Amino acid sequence: MFDLNISPDQKRALILLFSLCLGLGGFYFLNSKPSAAPELTQDLILPIQESSTVQSSQIIVNVAGKVANPGVYSLTIGSRVIDAINMAGNQLRGVDISDINLARILIDGEQILVGAPAQVVAKKAAAKITSTNPLDINKATAAQLDTLPGIGPVTAQRILDYRSKVGHISAVDELKKISGLGGAKFEEIKSLLRV
């Protein structure tokens, strides 16, 4: 061992000084590190989260027809049809809106038509699908597709899902790619469809 010619009192003083430095260093280290990290997180990360939330929490809808101020409006996600109509200044006096589902949640990019003539809507629904009056598969609703022979709600939804996926169906034969629409079932409905 090394002999440094240190007296026992000097050894006690050095041990005490070393222990004091070690204790102060540990105390400073343990107390200063946690307080610095939350400030950094709150100052730098939260403003970024707030700005991205603002951008993605809005939808755009077009309110048209018989309202005080028809136009395009920005609403928060989860808004209902009644919110959009209110934003457009409400329906004009005497306009019946009982045929509109006011409680329906809005979808980005949709149009709400207020005051559409009831007889026009009824005529479209009453038109029978035949080979001389085929159904446009790019505009058909699930209810219209469901009226085709051999097509139920599940297959009708598959057609709508496929149409959403490809954007536009360019030929009736494309429907053969959809599960449940091959063979005899397709042959039965192809004359009732058009693009």
Image: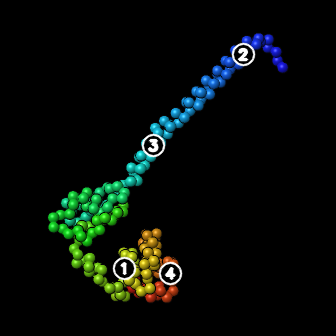
Of labels 4 and 3, the one closer to you = 3
Structural distance between the alpha carbons of marks 1 and 3: 48 Å
Q: Judging from the image, what secondary structure is the residue with disc 2 in?
A: helix
Mark carried by residue 12: 2
Q: Is there any visible trace of residue 132 in the rendered image? A: yes
Mark carried by residue 180: 4
- According to the picture, the residue beneath numbered tag 3 turns out to be 46
Q: In the image, residue 45 lies at what x, y percent? A: 47, 42
**Closest to the observer, 27 or 42:** 27
Q: In the image, residue 93 lies at what x, y percent? A: 15, 64
Structural distance between the alpha carbons of marks 2 and 3: 52 Å
Q: Judging from the image, what secondary structure is the residue with disc 3 in?
A: helix
Of labels 1 and 3, the one closer to you = 3
Mark carried by residue 144: 1
Q: Residues within 10 Å of mark 2 (few under 14, many from 20)?
A: few
Of labels 1 and 2, the one closer to you = 2
Structural distance between the alpha carbons of marks 1 and 2: 96 Å
Q: State which quarter of the image contains the C terminus.
A: bottom left
Amino acid type of the residue tagged 2 in the rendering: Arg
Choose the circle earlier in sequence order: 2 or 3. 2
Choose the circle earlier in sequence order: 1 or 3. 3
**Closest to the observer, 133 or 119:** 119
